[in-house]
Image (cartoon, grey):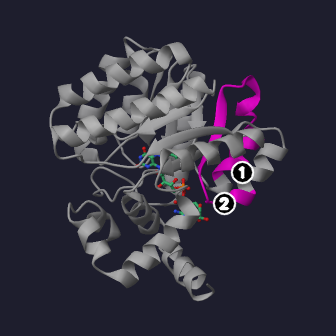
C-alpha cells in the first residue's frame, strides 16, 4: 500500500528516479503541503492567522535513522520555535517522536523533546506529539508522560480513536487539564487492535471527545467528518471553550471556513519540508481519490 511505501527508506530515491511519479506526487503535494521551506509554512501560517484561524505547524519527517538526522530535525524545529516566538505567534508545533529519535532510543526522543519544550514554554508555544503506528504507542505515551510532568501546559498528545486501547489511555495516561487531540487514526492496524472506518468508529470518536471534555482536558477535535462535527455542534460541548476543531491544510476547506464563520474556534494543520512525499503518501493512503485529483490537476496544467 502507499503506507508501506511511505515508510521505505529509499522512497525518496525511488520517487526522484521516476520523473512521472515525481511530477504526479509533487502536483498532489502542492495542494496539501505549504512548500519545502520553513518560510513557506510561516507565510501560510501568517495568512491563515490573519483570516482568524489558529495554526499548527509540522516540519515533515519520521523514522529518522541516524543521530545526525535527529539533530538536524531538532535544529529545524528549534529554528521554527524561535521564529514563531519572535513573531509572538501563539502557534502549535507538531511532530512525530520518531522524527527526533524514538526509532533509535526512547531516551533520545525524550531528551530532544525536553530541550524543545524548554525553549517553547516561555514563548507560550505548544508542542504536540503526533501518534504513530500501534507498535510505538506505549513508547510514545511513556515519553509523553515523562515530559508533560515537567511542562504540563506546553506538551500535548494525539490519541487515535481507531485503537481499542485508547479509551483506557485517555482515562489513565493523561494528567488533569491536558492538551489532547483526537483523530480517527491514519495507520493500517489489525482487527485485534483497531476498528476500520465505520459508524462504530464514529460513535467511539464521539465518546472519546465527550470523555476528554468531561475530564477537563482541552480538546482538539481533529477530523474532516461532517457527521461527527454536526453531532458535536448539536450536543453543545463546545460552549465552555474547552474544544476546537482542527483540520489538515487543503482538506475540506469549505467546511473549516463555514465553522469559523459560525464563530467556532478552528485550527489549520500546516506542513512543510523537503520530505513532502512522505506526507503526501499518508494523505493518498487514507483517501485514494487524492491521487486521481492530482492526475486531473496535472492534466489540466
Ligand atoms: P475520514 O472518515 O477518514 O474522512 C471523512 C471525510 O473527510 C472524507 O469522506 C473526505 O471527504 C474527507 N477527507 C478525509 N481525509 C481526506 C484526505 N486525505 N483528502 C481529502 N479528503 C479527506 N493520524 C494519526 O494516526 N496520527 C496523528 O498524529 C494524526 N494527526 C492528525 C492531526 C490533525 C490536525 C488531523 C486533522 C489529522 C491527523 N491525523 C493523524 C490523521 C487522522 O488520523 C485521519 O487519518 C484523517 O484526519 C482522516 O480522517 P477523518 O477523521 O477526516 O475521517
Q: Which mark is residue 252?
A: 2
Q: Is residue 229 magenta?
A: yes
Residue 247 x %, y %: 60, 49
Q: Secondary structure at mark 2?
A: loop
Within 8 Å: ligand 1 and the Cβ of disc 2? Answer: yes
Q: Is residue 283 left or right of residue 9?
A: right
Q: What is the CA distance from the residue labelled 2 to the residue labelled 1?
A: 7 Å
Residue at left offset 47%, top offset 73%: 288
- The numbered dot on residue 42 is none
Viewer-nearest residue: 118 or 227: 118
Q: What residue is disc 1 on?
A: 256
Circles 2, 1 touching at the beta carbon (< 8 Å)? yes
Badge 2 density bin: few <14, some 14–19, many ≥20, Cα 10 Å: some
Q: Residue at x 26, y 67 (%)?
A: 11
Which quadrant does the C terminus fall into? Answer: bottom right
The foreground one among 231 and 261 is 261
Range covered by the magenta-colored residues: 228-254
Q: Residue at x 44, y 32 (%)?
A: 79
Amino acid at each position: 500500500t502507499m503506507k508501506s511505501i511511505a515508510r521505505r527508506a529509499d522512497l525518496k530515491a525511488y520517487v526522484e528516479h521516476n520523473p512521472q511519479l515525481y511530477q504526479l506526487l509533487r502536483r498532489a503535494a502542492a495542494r496539501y503541503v505549504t512548500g519545502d521551506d520553513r518560510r513557506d509554512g510561516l507565510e501560510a501560517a501568517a495568512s491563515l492567522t490573519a483570516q482568524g484561524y489558529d495554526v499548527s505547524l509540522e516540519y515533515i519527517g519520521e523514522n529518522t535513522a541516524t543521530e545526525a538526522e535527529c539533530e538536524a530535525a531538532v535544529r529545524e524545529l528549534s529554528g521554527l520555535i524561535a521564529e514563531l516566538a519572535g513573531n509572538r505567534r501563539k502557534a502549535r508545533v507538531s511532530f512525530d517522536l520518531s522524527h527526533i529519535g524514538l526509532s533509535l532510543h526512547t531516551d533520545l526522543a525524550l531528551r530532544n523533546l525536553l530541550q524543545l519544550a524548554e525553549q517553547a514554554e516561555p514563548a507560550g508555544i505548544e508542542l504536540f506529539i503526533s501518534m504513530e503506528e500501534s507498535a510505538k504507542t506505549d513508547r510514545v505515551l511513556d515519553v509523553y508522560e515523562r515530559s508533560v510532568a515537567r511542562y504540563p501546559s506546553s506538551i500535548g498528545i494525539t490519541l487515535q480513536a481507531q485503537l481499542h486501547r485508547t479509551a483506557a489511555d485517555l482515562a489513565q495516561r493523561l494528567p488533569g487539564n491536558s492538551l489532547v487531540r483526537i483523530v480517527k487514526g491514519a495507520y493500517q492496524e489489525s482487527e485485534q487492535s483497531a476498528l476500520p472506518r465505520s459508524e462504530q468508529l464514529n460513535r467511539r470518536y464521539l465518546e472519546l471527545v465527550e470523555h476528554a471534555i468531561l475530564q477537563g482536558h482541552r480538546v482538539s477535535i481533529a477530523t474532516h467528518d461532517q457527521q461527527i462535527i454536526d453531532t458535536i455542534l448539536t450536543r453543545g460541548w463546545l460552549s465552555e471553550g474547552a474544544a476546537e476543531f482542527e483540520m489538515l491544510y487543503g482538506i475540506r476547506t469549505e467546511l473549516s471556513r463555514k465553522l469559523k464563520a459560525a464563530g467556532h474556534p478552528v485550527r489549520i494543520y500546516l506542513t512543510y519540508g523537503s520530505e513532502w512525499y512522505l506526507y503526501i503518501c499518508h494523505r493518498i493512503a487514507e483517501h485514494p481519490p487524492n491521487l486521481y485529483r492530482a492526475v486531473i490537476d496535472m492534466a489540466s496544467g
